[in-house]
Amino acid sequence: MSRLLGALALALVVLVATGCHNDAPRRLARAKDALFEKDPTRALKEYRLAVDALENDTSPESQVLRARALRGAADVYYLEQRDFPKAVEVYRELIQLCPEAPETLEARIHLADVLSVRYHDLRGAINELTAALARNPPQGAELEYKVAKLYFEIADYPQSELEAQNVVKKYETSAFVERAMFLSGQALAMEGKRAEAMRAFQEMVERFPDSELQPHAYLEMAKLKADSDEDEKAIEYYVLALRRHPDPKLVQSSITRLRRRIASTKPARIGDHEAAFDHVVVRAPRAKSSVEAAGGTAEEAAHDFGD
């Protein structure tokens, strides 16, 4: 009898587990339909019911379904309802419960976006992207570049430059390489390493002559030269930037200011009569008195007038 009861109990557990497996996929399908019908509230309800149905199930199949349900719910909060606190909560729940699931990779990327843009938690965003990069994702170049930019925003310029160089070295054929090279130059400039920054910008414009960043690189090079009091060389780079820069008035005004500075600090040249007369006051000769005209001195003339 006891054996029979044990067998019945085991069968009941299997039946319940099977029922959960059968219910969760249906809930996920209903959530997908609700999103197609633009009903995010109903979709969230179905995602949560799917998660609840899998609560006591630790099978590999349940882990797959749980990850899908949590990812779906978090994305609805983030992308549809713009409920950022709930999105953060569910993304973190997914990361904690299903750390190795494929859905967790994208969850970390979305969570990094929310943390950086909505909460200005740049270090938190860096942590999430770094964890995503540890899984060698296909979008590695983009994520590494984002990390470099975030370090730049928190003014950790040495680390920003290091991360940017990682993009250049590890992803040679990526479209993010030129951006990383430009960012590397900016980071070096902020560190006060003008010569290294100049080389970084020069390498970028030589390697990517048709890049939309090319005129911006020339502009940065002009600023570096101007900061080093190499005004004539700075103007050369400003002129190069002017050819393709999207805001030519900005570049032209920089050229004008620099030329005024050159003019105001340039010393007058020998033989420059016009400049010389600007600084010389020509006085009319004083008329001589009768004493002086007869050969007396100025002192004698003054004494004579005093008498």
Image (cartoon, helix red, strand yellow):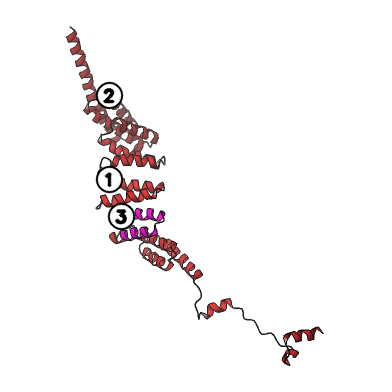
Name the residue type under label 1: Gly
Q: Position of residue 155 (x, y in %)?
A: 41, 48
Name the residue type under label 2: Ala
Say if mark 1 contacts mark 3, CB within 8 Å: no
Say if mark 2 contacts mark 3, CB within 8 Å: no
Which quadrant of the view contains residue 232?
bottom left
Tag count in the figure? 3
In-front residue for pair 149/225? 225
Name the residue type under label 3: Glu
Q: Which residue is mark 3?
A: 178
Residue 21, labelled with which disc?
A: none
Element carrying mark 3:
helix
Q: What stretch of residues is rendered in magenta?
A: 176-204
Which quadrant of the view contains residue 121?
top left
Looking at the image, which residue is at 59% across and 78% down?
280
What distance separates the C-alpha of mark 2 from that of mark 3?
Answer: 49 Å
Q: Which residue is mark 2?
A: 53
Q: Position of residue 27 (x, y in %)?
A: 26, 28
What distance separates the C-alpha of mark 1 from that of mark 2?
Answer: 35 Å
In-front residue for pair 162/274? 162
Q: Which residue is mark 1?
A: 140
Element carrying mark 2:
helix
